Amino acid sequence: MNCDYLRENLLEYLDGSLLPSDQAAAEKHLADCPQCREAVQQESKLAREITRGMEQAVEGVGLQVVDRRRMARAVERQLGDFREQPLGLFWKRMAWSFAMAAIVLVAGIWTGLHFRSEQNSKLEAERKPALFLNRESVIHFVYTVPEYTFRREGNQVVDALTSETIVAEQSLAQKNEKTRTGETYYEN
Amino acid sequence: MGMDEVKLAGALKGRDPAAIDELIETHGDRLLRSATLLCGNEATAQDLVQDAFVEALRSVHRFRGQASLYTWLHSILLNLTRHHHRDNKRIVYDNELAAQETSTLEEQVDATDIESAGAELQRALGQLSDSHREVLVLRYYEHMKMDEIARNLGVSKGTVKSRLHYAIREMQKLLPAEMNLFGAGGTKEVV
């Protein structure tokens, strides 16, 4: 430890914020160096004098009771609902969130129920054909059979297209059924 | 942080209505004096202290209790004061405080008059730059250590030392020689 180091770190020494080893070295140096001891005393005196001057400068400054009340009310006004009870304040702040959550919940429940009823309808539709298992289905056929004919007249070939419409009716017993995308296919 | 402080901080976080009154009761005066030294005008200082309380209560959930409530409040106040100075560019220092304690010119230069010494110091502080005034107030009124000042102002310890050195030199010029507030010693300049 030398004089330069101590003078440069005088404030830290007075703060007691030097490393313990440096603090001890400074103490040892001060014991042997009257100039540095004088510098420490000067600095301490300076600090005391400035502190005293500042305290005197604001000696009469302070908040009267009325000032404190006014300040407290002003602070509360600026803070809004500081005086509200925490629970009331909680509900007030969360009102919108809860409202939105309730709407989403109701929409979710409605969608769920709606979907479920649709599913039930489909399942019911699947089950229903069992009731008709032993019934007969009558199928009407209407079809046209074309007939293309050729005949020879002298050196020419004459063609003619005729058709015949056939109406038929047949009774079929149901053997099997499959449900696919809401349509029912019957297979013989 | 003492037990009472722990309770008060807890009450503020729990939004206890009485806590705000207690906070102002406990720390209002000291903050107001510090603010008056920092901005030089008691009315402005009251506004700044009020704003500091509002800011503190708005962010009380962030208070971890690592420093005392006063230290935390003062750091908010210092921040607001710096913003105030920045917004107003040139600080208009109120000499009312000085006038209250100084009735005649003779009294102003009377170094033995304790009251006028305070008034003179207040006047001289008002003529310093914001950065020089800040370090003097934090060091000699708030009794902050060098690393605390550096942390509060967001500068290095070297910068704090340098500002202190120049601030004291300026005060020596501004104050009447008879007051002899500042001796030949002091901080060593670090650039």
Image (cartoon, grey):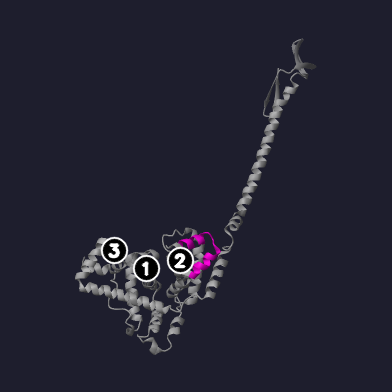
Q: How far across and down, in percent of the image, does residue A182 sit? A: 69, 29
Where is mark 3, residue-wise?
A18
Determine whether the residue tagged by mark 3 lies in a helix, strand or loop: loop
Q: Between marks 3 and 1, how big is the CA–CA gap?
A: 15 Å
Residue beneath the point at 27% across and 74% down: A41
Chain bearing tag 2 is B
Q: How far across and down, in percent of the image, does residue A43 sit? A: 29, 74
Residue beneath the point at 32% across and 70% down: B162
N-terminal label among 2 and 1: 2
Query: Which residue is nearer to you in this view: A131 or A22?
Result: A22
Q: How far across and down, in percent of the image, does residue A11 sit? A: 30, 69
- Work out whether B89 lies above or below A85: below
Q: Between marks 2 and 1, how big is the CA–CA gap?
A: 14 Å
The three-letter code of the residue at mark 3 reads Leu
| Dot 3 crowding, Cα within 10 Å, few <14, some 14–19, many 20+ | some
Residue beneath the point at 21% across and 74% down: A35
Where is mark 1, residue-wise?
B144
Q: Are marks 3 and 1 on the same chain?
A: no
| Dot 2 crowding, Cα within 10 Å, few <14, some 14–19, many 20+ | many
Provide the residue span drawn in magenta.
B4-25
Please say whether residue B89 is visible from this viewpoint.
Answer: no
